[in-house]
Every structure is written in C-alpha cells, then in structure tokens.
Image (cartoon, grey):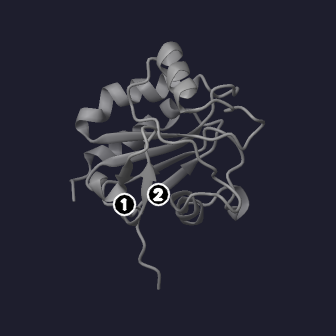
Amino acid sequence: MNHQTIYNFEAKTQQGTTLNLSDLKGRVILIVNTASKCLFTKQYTELEQLHKKYHDLGLTILAFPCNQFGNQEPGDAEQIKEFCTFNYDITFPLMAKIEVNGANAIPLYEFLKKRARGILGSTNIKWNFTKFLISRDGKTIVRYGPWTTPKQFEIGIQSLLDEPSV
C-alpha cells in the first residue's frame, strides 16, 4: 500500500529554491495552476483576498504558473512575477513554472491528480486555475475546477482551518 502524503513532495519556488511541503504540516494548503492570459486570471484577486484573510490563521496558497493550456503563460519567472504583482498585488508564493500533465508533469501534481480526481474520475488537469485544497493533516484533498472561484469554497477553507493542527 502506498503511504505517500503531500508532505513527501517538494517544489521549486520562483526564486529557484526548494520548498519541502513537509514544512507546511499543520497548515491548510491551496495549490493552483495559474496563467496570466486566461479567462480565469481574475481569480488571482480572490486568491489574494483569501491569503490576506486566512494566512495568519494557517492557510498557505501556492500558485504554479503553467503554460500547457492555450499558451496562456508564455512568460519567464520575472515576467510572471511582474504581471502578478502589478495587476493583482499578489503576496502569496508564486512557484516555478511547471507542467501539470504529460511526461514532464511534476511529481507533486501526479500525486494530487490521483488523490483528487476530476469529473468522471479523470486524472488530467483540464485547464488553468484547477485548485487543490488540502487539510491540515494532509489527508483530505479536494479538487475544484477552473469555473469554481476561490470565494465559492471559502466555507470549506474556514472549516479546514477550524480543525486542530497536527
């Protein structure tokens, strides 16, 4: 039996350092694949609002820029950061640009896609701004599609934050 958890993974930050997800034990984590030129890009506003409202209560948002859907994130790390800072005043972590599907998908996303499947049990990410919400103990992982805005599941974030830390 596979006992992998979210805490077995790491990811590269936009600055090129490594974030061990085990460092986030006890926090509620929201992982999102993002793009700057997408119909859903305006969700950055709600993500930032949630970050400001809940970060000190235990929420960590990680945005993973991805260019696999309609070439909507063509920029390099500096261009992405500039866009997010200038247009949305993002203060939550922007991670290194990644692939979420296919042979070059990062292991973290392979894990998330299998643990929280999409519509009809599919594992592939269908588009930008697919969101994974992970409980403080890492055991509960819920997937939200691009059309579901962060504000629509804020109550879910609140309930996970109300659970005791591990």
> Residue pushed farthest top?
86
Q: Work out whether 107 lies above or below 49.
A: below
Residue at position x 27%, y 42% in the image? 58
Question: Closest to the observer: 136 or 103?
Answer: 103
Location of residue 140 by image quarter: bottom left
Q: Secondary structure at mark 1?
A: loop
Q: Position of residue 25 (x, y in %)?
A: 28, 56
Tell me how far mark 1 sits from mark 2, CA to CA.
7 Å
Disc 1 to disc 2: CB gap under 8 Å = yes
Q: Position of residue 96 (x, y in %)?
A: 51, 42
Residue at position x 24%, y 37% in the image? 57
Q: Amino acid at mark 1?
A: Gly
Does 63 sit left or right of 7 as displayed? right
Question: Closest to the observer: 38 or 86?
Answer: 86
> Residue pushed farthest right?
70
Location of residue 107 by image quarter: bottom right
Residue at position x 63%, y 52% in the image? 100
Q: Which residue is mark 1?
A: 138
Q: Which residue is mark 2?
A: 141
Q: Residues within 10 Å of mark 2 (few under 14, many from 20)?
A: some
Q: Secondary structure at mark 2?
A: strand
Q: Residues within 10 Å of mark 1 (few under 14, many from 20)?
A: some
Q: Position of residue 69 (x, y in %)?
A: 74, 40
Does 19 sit left or right of 56 as displayed? right
Q: Work out whether 112 lies above or below 29.
A: below
Q: Position of residue 149 (x, y in %)?
A: 56, 32
Does 147 sit left or right of 29 as displayed? right
